[in-house]
Amino acid sequence: MNKPELRQRMRARRRALSLSERRRAARGLCQVLQSAPLFMRARRIGLYLANDGELDPLALMVLAWRRRKQVFLPVLQDRPFERMWFAPYSPGDELVPNRYGIPEPGWDAAVSGRCLDLVLMPLVAFDVKGNRLGMGGGYYDRSFAYLRRRRHWRRPLLLGVGYDFQQCPKLPGDVWDVPMDGVVTESRLLLMRR
């Protein structure tokens, strides 16, 4: 199955989940990650606001704030390069829809992903080798392309977030794909060996 077909099938499947199934999965996600060392050590965490049936990390966001961690949300830069930055986000901050209709904070304090300890990325599909199929815009791959060349200092850790059913035996890859360091689902944390 090619990427567009797989993307379409997986997106339809996650959108078909009931509200109670989504809530149950979100609680599971928080339970799996809340005591994981990589989450506990991270001080600056990139998260996202769920869209299109994605597994919702809102409970993790609230937990991070309670533990006095800084939360950052993606902000898109369309010109001169289609890149993603991360802006600090606190409860009550104003959000504005980006060109895809996804709410994001203002640009005034946006930083590069290099400044973060951990980034949780939504995904459409994943495999056990750390390959990720996203929505097709390439923002995460372009923003973290430098990690493909790094051998030692590999900040931030990239953790995909998805439902168990989004795992595939093997995903087709491209040379520009940036592999994930792990995946967290509603039932488990899967770390990849680098």
Image: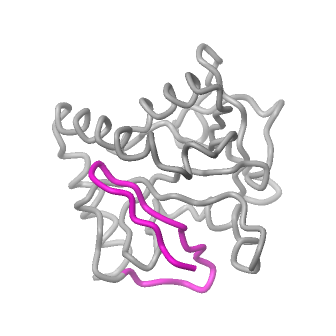
Residue 79 versus residue 22 in the image, above or below: below
Q: Quadrant of the C terminus?
A: bottom right
Q: Nearer the viewer, residue 98 or 27?
A: 27
Residue 80 versus residue 176 in the image, above or below: above
Q: Is-magenta flag for residue 180?
A: yes
Q: Is residue 168 left or right of residue 158?
A: left
What's the magenta bit mostly, secondary-structure-wise? loop
Q: Is-magenta flag for residue 179?
A: yes
Q: Is residue 142 left or right of residue 184?
A: right
Q: Nearer the viewer, residue 182 or 102?
A: 182
Q: Residue at x 36, y 66 (%)?
A: 125
Residue 84 versus residue 73 in the image, above or below: below
Q: Is residue 110 left or right of residue 105?
A: right
Residue span colored magenta: 171-194
Q: Percent position (x, y) of residue 22?
A: 24, 38
Q: Percent position (x, y) of residue 169?
A: 28, 81
